[in-house]
Image: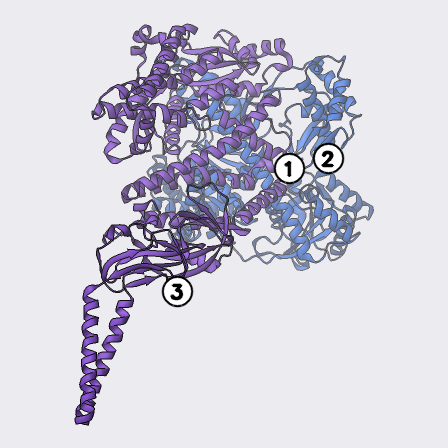
Chain colours: A purple, B blue
Amino acid sequence: MSPVLPTFHESWYRVADLKLRIRSSVHIVRQRYRGQRRYVVLDQANNAAFSLPQPGYQLLGLLDGTRTLREAWESCCKVLGDEAPTQGEALDLLGQLASNNLLESELPPDAAGMFERYKKRKKRELQNALMNVLFPRIPIFDPDAILEKGIFLVGWIFSWPGLVVWLAVILAGIYTLLNRGPGLGAALASASHILRPDNWLLLYGAFVLDKLVHESGHAIACKKFGHQNGTSGEVHVIGLMLLVFTPVPYVDASSAWLLKNRWQRAIVGAAGMWVEFALAASAAMVWALSSPASTLHDFAYNLMFIASVTTVIFNANPFLRYDGYYILSDLLEIPNLFGRSIQYATYLIKRYAFRLEHMVNPADTPGQKVWLVVYLLLAGIVRVLVSSLIVLFLVRELHNHPEIMLLLAVMAAAGIAVWLLVPLGRGVWYLLDSPELLQHRTRAVLISLAAVLLLAGTVGLIPLPNHCRVEGVTRAKIQRRIYVQTSGFLESFLPSSRLVHAGKNGTVLLRLVNPSLQSKLAALVGRWDAAKVRWRKALDHSPAKAQIYHHEIQAIAERLVRLRHKVSELTISAPVSGTWIAPSLHLHIGAYLHRGQQVGTVANWQTMLVFGAADQNRAGRIIRAGSHNTEIRVYGRPGPVVPAVIHREFPAGGNTLPSAALSYLGGGPFAPNPQRNEPLATGTPVFLLEVQPREPVAWLPGQRVQMRLALPDESLAMQLVDMLRRALESHGGA
Amino acid sequence: MTTIPSDLWRMLGRLEAPPPIPRGLDAFWHKGAGMVRRMVPRRHIYMRKATAVHQLRAAVQVLTESQLQQRLTETAEVFGRNRDTPADRIHAAALIREAALRLTGEEPYEVQVAGALALFDGSLVEMATGEGKSLTATLPAIMAGWRRRGCHIITVNDYLAQRDAEQFAKLYHFCGLTADYIGEGMDGPRRRQAYAADVTYCTNKEVCFDFLRDKLVLGPAGRGSGAMLHDIDFTLAGRLVQRGLYFAIVDEADSILIDEAITPLLISGGQVNRDEMDCFRQAIAMAEDFQPGLDYTPHATRKQVELTRSGHTRLANQRQGLHGLWHSQHRSEELLTQVLVARHFYHPGKQYVIQNSRVVIVDEFTGRLMPDRMWHDGLHQVIQARENVEIQAMRETLARISYQRFFRLYMHLSGMSGTLAEVQGELWHIYQRPLVVLPTHRPCIRGHQGLRVFATEKNKYEAVIAIIAQLHQQKRPILVGTRSVAASETLSAQLTKLGLPHHVLNAVQHAREAHIVAAAGRSGQITVATNMAGRGTDIRLDAAARNAGGLYVIAADINDAARIDRQLAGRAGRQGDPGESIHFCALDDILLQTHTPRIAKMLAKVFRNGHVQPRWLAAWLVSVAQHRASRSSHRQRQTVALTDHWLEESLSFSGNTG
C-alpha cells in the first residue's frame, strides 16, 4: 500500500525526528528520461537499483545525518512548493530505501528486520526463479576483480579504432565466405544438418563459447563505459542460465544503469551481439579455409551458425527479454518497457472500460502511450509465436524420449499456470474483491463477463471455415496398363507418345511372334485335317468309329480356337483412346516378353484426376464433409488454383499408397512401413480419394499436388483441439 | 546498583511486534485451519468441564469459610507458579464458584462456568444477553490474577468498569486479589495504582490510550529488543502507568474488536496556528459557491467528494490573492474537499454533537460519544470552524495504534459477547481466537414481530408512536432503540406531544442511564435510547410487566450490522423472561440510501406513504443493505490492517513499532 495524498500522514511521527543518511555504498546518478530528470539509486552491495524523480532526490539530498527528517521535509516544502513530496510520498520513498537496507540512522540498526528482509528477498528471488522456470539463473562467481585488471587490454574493443577493426573482421568474414572454400551455397545447404544428433556436442560447444564471448562483451563494455563515467561499472555476477536445460553463461551488467548517456547504455546492451558478430565472421574464415573433413571445420561451421542466426532471432529481438529489449527500452527511454506497457493496458481497461476515476496514468508523455500500446501488441504476438514455435520444435525433435516429453509437459503446465492461470485468478480476485472497484463493480464484472463470453463465443461457438490439406498425385482418368497376354518375341511396336484409338480397328500397339505357338497351330491344323479324313472314311465303314472320330475332331477344333485366340493376342491393340506410352520398348525388340509383363500404358490425358491419400485422422471428417469444394495446387507450379470436387472416396483404409511420390522416400508425407520392403507400403492406414478438377487442366501424370479440402465449419476451439490431437497422435504414435 | 522491576522488563519485551496477521496464501491456509478448528466440539468440551465443576459442589459446600480461603490460597500458589493443570483449573473454578455464591449470593450457572473456562483458555465466547457475563468474567480473571501479572477486563464504558470492579471487589479480595478500575479523568498515580491491581476493569479506549501514553514516555526505550541499554532509563518504572499487557478479557468483544477497529487510535499534539484558522474560515465561506453536481460530485458510500473541472477552475480563481495554505494547490484542494465532505456527510446530532463548545464525535455504531477522538486531515477543524467553536490546532500525530494491533499485543486475549458468530471468520483471521458458542441457561421465549420498512421517515415515526401508544395502554414496558441522538430526540418530542411519559438516554451519562435502563423493565415504563445506551445493564422485569407480556423492544432504525439489531432485540426476553421485539426502518434511512439507493428509490415510488410489502421483500432489502454495509466496514478494517502491515514493512527502520 502506498499512501500518497494528502500532504500530511498520520505515521509521520514515527520518522519525523530521525536523523537519516543514505548509506555510503550507494551511488546516485542523474539521468534524463524523455526530457525528465530522474535519479538512479544503485546499491552495489546488493545490486539493487531504482529511480527517483527530482523532488524525491532533493529530499534525499538534504538527509545528511545531521538534519532531522522533519527539517529536511519542511525546507523541501519551502523550496519546491507544490512539487515537494507529500509526507506519504516521503514515507514511501524512505520505506523503499530502508527495505533495501540503504538508510542509516543514529538508531541501532534493526537487525531482526534486516534478517527478515534478507529472508524475504531470498524468497522473492526463489519465486522469480520458479516463475522463470524455463530460464532459471544460477550465479557462480564475481568477475569484477579480473575485469578491473584486464580492462586496459580489451577496453579498446568499444572505441573508434575498435569499430574499424570490427568492420574489417566482418568484411573479411563475408569476403571469405563468399569467395573462398565451399562458399555460401554450401553453408546454407549444410544448415539442415545442424540439429542432427551426431552434431549435438559440437553445437553445444559452439553455443557455450559463443555465449561466453557474448557475455564478456557485455561485461567489458559495462566496465569500459563505467570507467569513462567514473561509476566504475561494476560487474559482480557471472552465472549459468539453464536455457531449456542447457546451461549457458550469463553476466549481470545492471550497473550499466548508472551510465548517463543512453547511447552508451544501448552500446552496453548491444556489446554482446557486437562481439558475437565478429566471432561469427572469424568462424566463417576458419570454416572457409580449413580442411572440410576436420572437426575444426565442423566446429567453425556451428559457431558461425550460432553466432549469427541465434543472435538475430533471439538477442536482437526486442520482443523477448534479451538484449534487444533492453536496447529498445534504453533508446525509447522507457525503463521496464514490458511492465509499463502492461500497466498502461490495465490502466486503459480500468479507466475506459470500468470507468474508474482517479487512475494514475502510467504513461508520462503522449509519445510514450503510442510506444506502450504498439509494443504490447507486438510483444504479445511475437511471444506467443516464438514460444509455440519452440514447443513445436521441441516436440518434433524430442518426441521419442518420453522422459523428456514428460518434463516438457510439466514445464508447459507450469508455464500455463504462471502465465495464464495466475493472472487470470488475480483478475477474478480483483473483480470480486478489490476496493478500487467499489462503485464500479457491477459494471466491471459485466464488462469482463461480456469480454470473456465474446471471446469464448468466438473461439468456442461460432463455426468458422475449416480446411485440411491432403497431398496427391495426378493421374489420367482413363488409363490402361498394357500387359503381354501371350508370351512372344517382340517383333514390332508403335513408338511411344503416339495417339492411339480404340475400337474394332484399334491402333496396333505392338506385335509379337511366337514360332512355337505358330508351329503348334500348324501341327494342330494338320491333326485336324487328318482326323477329318479318318472320320469321312469311317462314315462309310463303321458308323460307331465315325462317332469317335467326330468327337476327336470337335476336341481338336476347340483347342484350335483357343490357340488361334492366343496367337491373335500376340498383336496388341489399344483398348482405349489416348496416348501410347512405352518409352523403353525399343530396348526389348526381339526379346522374349512373358505373359503378364507390362509393356506400356495407354492414357487419356484429356481428363485428369488426382489421387490423394489422407491419413486416418482426417479421412473420417473428409468423408463426412463430402466436400464439393476442393482446391488443387501443383507443386512447383505457381499457376492458378484449380477448383475440383471429390469424385470417389474409398472409405476402407489400406496400407498401400497410390504413388511412391506420397511416401517419405518420394518426399511425401507418409512414412513407409519399415517391416515391408516395398516403396508403396505405409505404416499407418491411408484412405484414398479421387478428385476431379472442374475445369480442363494441362497436367502431366504423376505430378505431386496439394489439395485443400473444405471440412464442415467448426469453431476455432474445436479446430485447435483437433490440431493438437493430430499433432500428438502423429508424433506420439510414430 | 539499579534494579529493574521484572514487570518493566517484561513490558519492554512485549513491545515487540505482535504475531503477524497471515497474508496471501498463508491467509488461505490459516482460514482453512480455522475452519477445521471450528469442527472441534468446544461447546461440548466446556459444558462437560462445567459439569465436572458442578460435581465438585458438594465437596466444597461443606468447607468452612476459613477452609475455603485456605484452599483458595493453596490454589493461588499453584497458579502463581504457572504450574496449574486442567484438573487444577476445574478445582479452582469450583472453589471460586462457591466463594461467589457465599459473597455475592449469585451462583454461577453451568453455562457461565463453561464460558469462564473457555475464556481462561483464550477463546471467544458467545453468550446470550442477560446471561451474566460480568460474573462469568470474574472466574478467569481470578485465575489470571493469581498469576500476578495483571489482568484487564475491558468493558464498553467507565460506568460498567467501576460498577463491576466495586461489585466484585469482595470476591476478589476473598480470593486474595486486588481489583481496581480505570475511570475517565483519573491522574497518573491513580491509574498506576489501578493497573498495579491484580484485576483491572477498564474501557478499551482508556487502556489503549494509556498504552500509547506509556509509549511516548518510553521514547527510544520502547523499541523492544532494538533499544540500546543506555536508552532505558531506570526511573521509567515510576513514570509508566501500565505494567505490560498480559491477560485481557474483552466484554462485548464484537463491538470492541470489530466495530471499533475501523479507526486506529491516535495521540496528537501541536500548536494553534492563527493563519491556518483563518484558512479554515475562508474555506467555509468559499465553499458556499460550490454546487453539488456542477462543481463537485459527492460519493455517498466512500464519504468523499470529488471536484469536477469547473470546481477546479472555481477554486483556482478564488484562491488567488489568499495567503497561507492557499499558496499550495494541493493543500487548497484538500481543504476545500474537506469542507464539502463535512457539508454532505457530517451533520450535527448524527456524526457529532456540540458539548461545552467542543465538537465531540458520536460513534455511529453505538451512539456513544468519543471526546478523545478527532477526525483527521483537517476535517475536524473544518467542522469546528463551521460550528463556530474554537478551532483546535490541526494536530500532529504523536503515537498511533490500531485496535487490531493493540489487542494482539496481549499475551492472552479472550472475549465474550452476545453476537460473535457472524464475525468469527474475521476474529480468527486477525486475533487467531477460536469461538465457543454457549447455550442459554433457560430456553429463550422472546417473540420477534419482524421488520417493517416504511416509505418515509415520517410514516415510520407515526407507526412507532402508534405502537408505543397501544402497548403503553397494556402497561407493557417498552424500550425504543434509535440509531442517532437526533432520532431519539425527535421521537421524544413526539411522545411528549402525546403526553406519554418516557425517559431518553443518549449514552452520555452512563451511571444515570444505567439506572434508568435497569428500571426500564417496570410495567408502563417507556424508554427511548440510542442503541448502546445503558449497555451491560440487565433489564429486570417486575411482576406486573411479566404478566403484561414482558419487555417490548422497538428498534426504530436498522443498524449497519444485523448483529447490532440482534443485540438490541436481545435486551428483551433475558433468562427465559417473556419479551418481544420489532424492527422499523424507512426507505429514506441513511443505511438504505447509502447502500441500496436505487432499489430504495424504486420501492419508495411503489409504496408511497405505506410500508413495503410483502415482508420478504422488506427483509431482503434490509439484508442486502446490511450485507453491503458490513462488507464496506470490513474493507475499512482491512485497510487499517494493511496500513499496519505497510508501516511494519517499510517503516521498521524507525525502530518504532507502534
**Number of other residues with Cα within 10 Å of mark 2, as a class: few under 14, some 14 to 19, many 20 or more:** some
* Image location (x, y in percent) of residue B342: 71, 29
Output the chain of dot 2: B
Instruction: Choose between A199 and A391: the one closer to the eye.
Output: A199
* Image location (x, y in percent) of residue A325: 45, 24
Q: Residue at x 72, y 17 (%)?
A: B277
- Mark sitting on residue B366: none
Which structural element holds mark 1?
A: helix
The N terminus of chain B, quarter of image: top left
Q: Are marks 3 and 2 on the same chain?
A: no
Instruction: Choose between A432 and B577: the one closer to the eye.
Output: A432
Residue carrying label 1: B510
Using the rendered image of the protein, determine whether residue B22 is visible from the camera's viewpoint: no
Which structural element holds mark 2?
A: loop
Task: Give amino acid for label 3.
Answer: Asn
Residue carrying label 3: A505
Distance between the Cα atoms at labels 2 and 1?
A: 18 Å
Task: Give amino acid for label 1.
Answer: His
On screen, residue B142 above or below A187? below
Distance between the Cα atoms at labels 1 and 3?
A: 132 Å
Q: Are marks 1 and 3 on the same chain?
A: no
On screen, residue B632 above or below B600? above
**Number of other residues with Cα within 10 Å of mark 1, as a class: few under 14, some 14 to 19, many 20 or more:** many
Question: Is A113 displayed left or right of B533 in the figure?
Answer: left
On screen, residue A288 above or below A443? above
Distance between the Cα atoms at labels 3 and 2?
A: 123 Å
* Image location (x, y in percent) of residue A41: 46, 14
Residue A543 in which image quadrant = bottom left
Question: Is B219 displayed left or right of A684 in the figure?
Answer: right
Q: Are marks 2 and 1 on the same chain?
A: yes
